Amino acid sequence: MSQQAETPFPRLWEESENTPYISFMQMLKIKEVCAAHQPEHKMHCYQSAVSGLSYGFILVGLAHLVLHRKAQSSYGRHMAPSCPGRKVPARPAWFLQEIPALLIPLLLMFLMHESSAVGKHLLLKTFCLHYFQRTFVYALLTRGQPFPLSVMMAAAFFCSINGFLQAHYLLHCAHLDDAWLSGYPCKIGLLMFYTGMAINVHSDYILRNLRKPSEVVYKIPTGGLFQYVSGANYFGEIVEWFGYAVATWSLPTLSFAVFSLSFIGPRAHYHHRFYQEKFKEYPKSRKALIPFLL
Ligand SMILES: NC(=O)c1ccc[n+]([C@@H]2O[C@H](COP(=O)([O-])OP(=O)(O)OC[C@H]3O[C@@H](n4cnc5c(N)ncnc54)[C@H](OP(=O)(O)O)[C@@H]3O)[C@@H](O)[C@H]2O)c1
């Protein structure tokens, strides 16, 4: 008797004493009691790590803006034909480098209790949605050239850190409530995010279909936002991440938007110059990144 009093289940065992089986309701009760006695996986906000990583992204982004001349050659059309080191076919490379940005937030979301419901909502409908598309649609359909292993590893490292930063911040640090979801900044930010994502996905679709399978040539992209800019996919991605920053209004989300702008903004400029040099008939009115402006 005294032993029974120490366990959380005495009453359940007594009820099932006269029957050779445990009823469904008793099983549910046992599950409830077990859950109540499980050690909780709580996670607090690591504010100094969040600030450090966010400022780090901004600094690395700005450093890239200064050093971009060299960095453009890392993959794709600007890569030297004699690029040293191992290469990985484009599909597995994109899949492996992008998947940490999807898996880490999902793991944090499902393993940790006591995370913000609004943060979870925003994380799933923006960041995770984007990385689901990039990992399971873009990566598996791309017709790009093989990727240098070193670039793939660097991108996977960035996606892991960024996946942790964005998920940890939104789940454990952000003070967002239901009223925030119905306010204008959140609505405007989400509108920007989905518009940018639609432009990005559509532009990548146009680029992909310029090539036949296993062909490696560059052609003039037309249609969609390519009528106005050479880097339509990059323009969409930048609008997307600034929309995400507005919808969540925070330093970590802004730092990712600034990082993206600093990384793919110059790349759009080099793509634009590449088209102008390669194709004499390239449309004169087309800009590099921002329609009618830049
Ligand atoms: N958030 C960030 O910081 C970040 C950073 C990098 C990339 N991204 C995103 O990742 C996606 C891919 O980026 P990316 O830098 O690889 O874009 P990209 O240089 O525009 O290339 C996209 C794909 O289309 C092919 N392609 C591009 N222009 C072409 C043309 N004129 N004719 C035929 N094929 C062409 C490329 O082949 P090749 O590979 O053979 O050139 C590649 O497979 C984009 O949506 C971009 O926004 C985001």
Image (cartoon, rainbow, N blue to C red):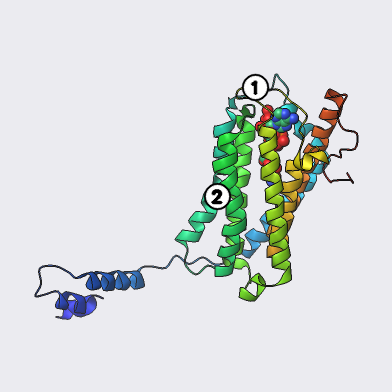
Residue at 73%, 42% in the rendered image:
233
Q: Is residue 168 left or right of residue 82?
A: left
Q: Is residue 136 left or right of residue 269?
A: left
Alpha-carbon neighbours of circle 2 within 10 Å: few (<14), some, or many (≥20)?
Answer: many
Front position in the image: 137 or 11: 137
**Tag 1: amino acid:** Glu
Front position in the image: 230 or 152: 230
Residue at 24%, 69% in the rendered image:
27
Image quarter of the C terminus: top right
Which residue lies under the disc numbered 2? 102
Q: Secondary structure at mark 1?
A: loop
Residue at 73%, 70% in the rendered image:
184
Q: Residue furthest top?
A: 82
Q: Secondary structure at mark 2?
A: helix
Q: Is residue 243 left or right of residue 44?
A: right
> Where is residue 186 drawn, in percent x and y?
69, 66
Q: Earlier in the sequence, mark 1 or mark 2?
A: 2
> Does 220 sit above or below residue 48?
above
